[in-house]
Image (spheres, grey):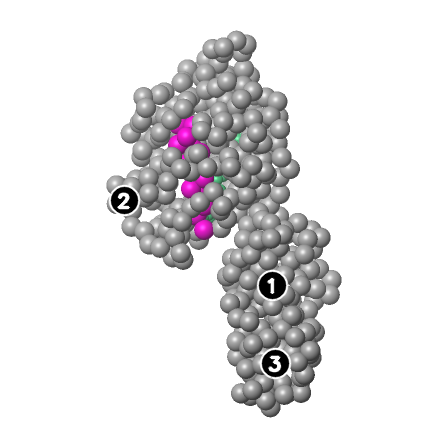
Amino acid sequence: MTGHYDVAIIGGGAAGLMCALTAGQRGKRVLVVDHANRVGKKILMSGGGRCNFTNTGTTPANFLSANPHFCKSALARYTPWHFIEMVERHRIAYHEKELGQLFCDISSKLIVKMLVDECHAAGVRIETSCSIERISHGEGENASFRLHTSHGAFAAPALVVASGGLSIPSMGASGFGYELARQFGHAVLPTRAGLVPLTLSGKHQERLADLSGVALPVTASCNGQSFSNFMLVTHRGISGPSILQISSYWQPGDDLRLDLLPGRDALEALQQWQHERPAAELKTVLGEVMPKRFAQRLCEVWLPNRPIKQFNLPQLREIADVLSNWPLVASGSEGYRTAEVTLGGVDTDELSSSTMQSRRVPGLYFIGEVVDVTGWLGGYNFQWAWASGHAAGMAV
Ligand SMILES: Cc1cc2nc3c(=O)[nH]c(=O)nc-3n(C[C@H](O)[C@H](O)[C@H](O)COP(=O)(O)OP(=O)(O)OC[C@H]3O[C@@H](n4cnc5c(N)ncnc54)[C@H](O)[C@@H]3O)c2cc1C
């Protein structure tokens, strides 16, 4: 046996490091095992290298889960302000980008350094490039978990699974946590890529492909959710914040609609143009409120293009309906290769929402993205990682 610990944590990502430093500060002997050659790789690449480390407006409504109540307790006990306090204590400069989204001024590296420094100060042992061959669990109340790894064997009465989701396999993502959950009898809800660009195919792709790079504000709606932000036409489909957000609510075959004049009443706008600029063509007036090439394509494929005075009221209504309810037929998503998160995961039904502990196997905990709790774009996923990591770190 190479070592006995109070807690063994699988995965040195956002949730694992937070759990480790919290438990370490409570005097627990903590081991973190990660198969990657360094910890916190996703933190490093997050937010374009500047880590959108939290969102000050975080509420349970910003998360998707089969049980929308599950995240409430942990989020209430470890708020964005708790994390900001640590960031400020480490003198990491940050700024607010969009509403509530906090980013580092300089680099995400500072967030990883802060977490690792806190871990070291709390005596946490971190083993990187360490692959886990097998995990076993003895019988009885005080049984330990035994980790058989490439660096030897370790034992601990508490095992925290913080191995993340399936997105970006090149960064060390693996399905390990889901397999482990099943090994211990936990249900795993179906997983799929979230916060991911959508792909178009056939004529839907051909109609937009040459507009690759064009961006415009839209409101994207699907299955009762709406997000207003930019959409970006890509080579293979559509992306941009509004599309990434709605992608988590969309599945193939679902009706996805875009309001191309967000915040405006399309019929009122058309009537105003008809009144003020009767001789102007539809594509000309639209090209003044959205990228010209996009307006032109709309008027080639989806809308009639004539001087605006030539449309009667029913025709204006039809045009308004297309503009505010434009149907976009996506064929799929870019998948885990580019997705920011994984939806679904370890079913929360058999976890305690205050400690993240398994109700099936005492001493077993699941935290972070491996759990069926997924945040919107904008710092919410890290806030869940911090909050769930803290909850388990206080309980182990
Ligand atoms: C490109 C990108 C940008 C993002 N930007 C943001 C952002 O700005 N703000 C935000 O809130 N969220 C962002 N996210 C999402 C966020 O990174 C994740 O939700 C968060 O990192 C999840 O934390 P976690 O600790 O659960 O998992 P991770 O941070 O993924 O950590 C899991 C760890 O487990 C290790 N591991 C996996 N399998 C094994 C195994 N078998 N054995 C040992 N170790 C293993 C991995 O190497 C990894 O270190 C981004 C994601 C991506 C992909």
Q: Earlier in the sequence, mark 1 or mark 3?
A: 1
- From the viewer's perspective, is residue 4 above or below residue 87? above
Q: Residue furthest front?
A: 313
* Magenta region: 378-393
Q: Is residue 128 visible?
A: no
Marks 1, 3: nearer the viewer: 1
| Residue that appears at 65% across and 70% down | 322
Please give the residue where the numbered disc 1 appears in the rendered image.
258
Marks 2, 3: nearer the viewer: 3
Q: Amino acid at mark 1?
A: Leu
Count up the numbered dots.
3
Residue 99: which disc? Answer: none
- From the viewer's perspective, is residue 122 above or below residue 296? above
Would residue 170 appear left or right of 332 to someone viewing this image?
A: left
User: Regarding mark 2 in the picture, which secondary structure is present there?
Assistant: helix
| Residue that appears at 62% across and 35% down | 189
Of residue 224 and residue 279, the one placed in the foreground of this image is 224
Please give the residue where the numbered disc 3 appears in the rendered image.
283
Quarter of the image with the C terminus is: top left
**Could you tell me residue 59's position as x and y percent?**
44, 45
| Residue that appears at 65% across and 75% down | 317
User: Regarding mark 3 in the picture, which secondary structure is present there?
Assistant: helix
